[in-house]
Image (spheres, helix red, strand yellow):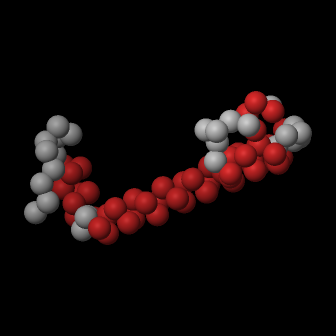
Amino acid sequence: METALGSPNLNEQQLDMLRLLRNPLPKEYFQQLRRLAVQLLGKQLDEVLDNWEENNDITESDYEKLSKEHFRTPYKKS
């Protein structure tokens, strides 16, 4: 573990998490922590996708159009 804490490839948040989890948690607590992390990452992904759709003027009709085309058809915004 000491090797990981001294790694120059880890950022401060990663180091903090390693310090917090230095001692093993009970399995049920660890499962809860994993679920919360996945929920947080999912929320972050939703925000990134929402911003991308907004910046690229992607609408529900664009998705509808894509769903009716062959997956290899290049997408062109109407």
Tell me the residue at 77%/43% (across/down). Answer: 18
Instruction: Using residue 19 as the reference point, say whether residue 39 is left or right of it.
Output: left
Q: Quadrant of the N terminus?
A: top right
Can residue 59 be seen here? The reply is no
Report the side of 23 relative to 15 (left or right): right
How far from the left and from the top, in percent, is residue 76? 12, 54
Q: How many marks?
A: 0
At a point 57% along the width and 53% down the height, the residue shown is: 41
Residue at left offset 68%, top offset 36%: 7
> Is residue 5 visible to the viewer in this orientation of the structure?
yes
Instruction: Work out whether residue 68 or residue 59 is closer to the camera in this orientation and state it.
Output: 59
Residue displayed at 46% across by 63% down:
47
Q: Position of residue 23 (x, y in %)?
A: 89, 39
Q: Residue 59's image quarter? A: bottom left
Quadrant location of the C terminus? bottom left
Tell me where residue 21 sits by quadrant.
top right
User: Could you say where residue 5 lies in the image, as x and y percent from the top left?
Assistant: 75, 38
Residue 58 in the image: above or below residue 19? below
Tell me if 63 is positioned left or right of 36 in this view: left
64 displayed left or right of 76: right
Closest to the observer, 3 or 68: 3
Q: Position of residue 77 (x, y in %)?
A: 14, 60
